[in-house]
Amino acid sequence: MTAAKQAGTKFESDLVAYLRGERLPAERLARTGAKDEGDVSLAKGGWTFILEAKARREKTTPLSIGAWLAEAHVEAENYAKAREFHVEDVTGILVVKRPNKSIGQSYVIMTLDDFLEH
C-alpha cells in the first residue's frame, strides 16, 4: 500500500472515531469499485451524508476541490441507489484533513445549495 493510501485509510478511520466520539453514527464504507459509495456515511438530523475524505500530507499539496466534491456527489448517488433511497435524501460532502492539524480542524466543504437544504 502506498504512503498516500495509508494516510487516506488512517484519516478515514480517525474521522469515524472522531464523529463517534461526538455521538454521531458514522460508518466506514467498503470500496465498491466503479460504483464506489464514498468513504464514510453519517446520519444526522434526518439526513444521510456521504463523506469523501481526503488527507493532505503537505501544505503544498494542491486542493482539487471541484473534482473531489464532484466525486462526493457521484458517490452519494451511488450510495442512495444501492439502498433504494431517494437520491435527494443523500448529500455528498468533502472532508479535507489539514496537514499537522487535528481531525476537528479538517475542512468540511459542500455546495451552497446543499448547505441551504440542510
Image: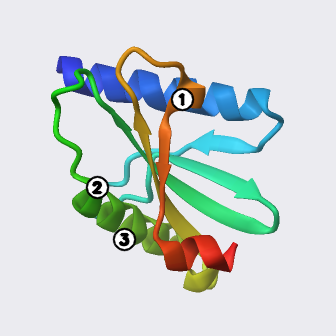
Answer few, some or many: residues within 10 Å of disc 3's Cα (few below 14, many 20 plus, some between 14 and 19).
some
| Residue 74 tag number | 3
| Residue 44 tag number | none
Observer-side mark, 1 or 3, equals: 1
Observer-side mark, 2 or 3, equals: 2
Classify mark 2: helix, strand or loop. helix
Please identify the quadrant where the C terminus is shown. Answer: bottom right
For image coordinates 40% across by 61% down, the residue present is 72
Say which of 86 and 84 sits in front. Answer: 86
| Residue 105 tag number | 1
Q: Is residue 3 above or below residue 68?
A: above
> Would residue 34 appear left or right of 22 to someone viewing this image?
left
Classify mark 3: helix, strand or loop. helix
For image coordinates 23% across by 61% down, the residue present is 67
Answer few, some or many: residues within 10 Å of disc 1's Cα (few below 14, many 20 plus, some between 14 and 19).
few
Q: How far apart are marks 1 and 2 (CA)?
A: 17 Å
- Of labels 1 and 2, earlier in sequence is 2
Asked if the residues shown at circle 2 and circle 3 are in contact, with their CB atoms under 8 angstroms apart, the answer is no
Please identify the quadrant where the N terminus is shown. Answer: top left
Residue 57 point in image, percent of width and height? 26, 22
**At label 1, which amino acid type do we have?**
Gln
For image coordinates 45% across by 26% down, the residue present is 11
> Would residue 88 appear left or right of 74 to someone viewing this image?
right
Q: How far apart are marks 2 and 3 (CA)?
A: 14 Å
Q: Name the residue under label 2.
A: 65
Q: Is residue 113 above or below residue 47?
A: below
Classify mark 1: helix, strand or loop. helix
Residue 16 visible at all = yes
Q: Residue 97's quadrant in the figure?
A: top left
